[in-house]
């Protein structure tokens, strides 16, 4: 899980490999970690909708978007105290969902994103990032953007050429998909927050297969 903290507002993200039968467990985790908006990817739910989970006072409203089949899918759990702050829901695809919320006197756009994985065709990946760039660039510059999700990339530890976008911390070497997300973030003046903090290697590595590691 990643948590973004600003003005007492916490956003977390999970890639869950199916939401079916796990919503209650996720709500408990959200309550325990005091997360206000929990982004989820790979829900494997069809269609779209919203539904309340949990007990009154400690519940969350789930907004989700899936495809025709039980593949991919994204969603967002919004804490009960923030439900009335949601002013717009944009369900662009089973890979991108955007919530616009009012926080005090500001507007914040929270995106949950599930990028095509490494086995997908290059054209599909490029189309995804081009469309996402368009949607984010349409958000007014005076509104905050928090983009969370499973990017299926590896930005590595080298920040040369992306000073201000890559914070200088990371693991291993950058792959082609990592370059793509850095170009995306740089073009929109966004920061890859996970690279802004020094972490132990065990917390940077997300995949291990024998001697191979990636983060």
Image (cartoon, rainbow, N blue to C red):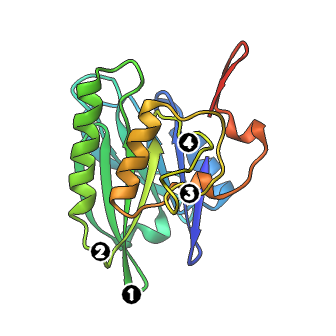
Q: Which of the numbered marks, if any, corresponds to residue 163?
A: none
Residue 105: image tag: 1
Residue at image position (34%, 61%) is 188
The correct choice, above or below, for 102 with respect to 100 in the image is below
What's the mark number on residue 141? 2
Q: Nearer the viewer, mark 3 or mark 1?
A: 3
How many numbered markers are drawn? 4
Q: Nearer the viewer, mark 4 or mark 1?
A: 1
Element class at badge 2: loop
The residue labelled by disc 4 is 24
Q: Report the Cα–Cα distance between label 4 and label 1.
A: 32 Å
Where 193 falls versus 175 (above or below)? below
Between tags 3 and 4, which lies in front? 3
- Is tag 2's residue or tag 1's residue first in the polypeptide sequence? 1
Residue in view at x 63 percent, y 48 percent: 28
The CA distance from mark 3 to mark 2 is 19 Å
Cα distance between the residues tagged 2 and 4: 36 Å
Q: Earlier in the sequence, mark 3 or mark 4?
A: 4
Spatial separation of the CA atoms under disc 3 and disc 1: 24 Å
In this rendering, position of residue 205 left or right of residue 174: right
Please say if 159 is above or below 103.
above
Q: Earlier in the sequence, mark 2 or mark 4?
A: 4
Image position, residue 104 (x, y; %): 43, 85
Q: Is residue 105 left or right of residue 123?
A: right
Q: Residue at x 27, y 46 (%)?
A: 49
First in sequence, mark 3 or 2: give its number.
2
Q: Which residue position holds label 3?
A: 193
Tag 3 and tag 2, C-beta contact below 8 Å: no
Relative to 30, 134 lies left or right: left
């Amino acid at each position: 899980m990643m948590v973004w903290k600003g003005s007492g507002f916490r956003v977390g993200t999970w890639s869950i490999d199916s939401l079916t039968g796990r919503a209650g467990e996720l709500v408990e985790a959200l309550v325990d970690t005091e997360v206000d908006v929990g982004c989820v990817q790979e829900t494997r739910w069809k269609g779209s909708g919203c539904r309340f989970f949990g007990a009154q006072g400690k519940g969350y409203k789930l907004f989700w978007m899936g495809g025709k089949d039980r593949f991919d899918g994204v969603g967002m759990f919004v804490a009960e105290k923030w439900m009335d702050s949601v002013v717009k829901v944009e369900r662009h695809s089973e890979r991108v969902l955007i919530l616009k919320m009012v926080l005090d006197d500001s507007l914040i756009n929270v995106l949950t994103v599930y990028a095509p994985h490494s086995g997908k065709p290059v054209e599909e990946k490029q189309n995804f990032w081009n469309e996402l760039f368009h949607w984010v660039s349409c958000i007014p510059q005076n509104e905050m953007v928090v983009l969370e999700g499973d990017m299926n990339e590896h930005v590595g530890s080298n920040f040369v050429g992306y000073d201000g976008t890559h914070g200088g911390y990371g693991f291993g070497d950058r792959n082609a998909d990592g370059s793509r997300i850095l170009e995306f973030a740089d073009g929109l003046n966004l920061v890859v927050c996970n690279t802004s903090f020094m972490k132990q290697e065990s917390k940077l590595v997300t995949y291990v297969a024998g001697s191979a590691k990636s983060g």
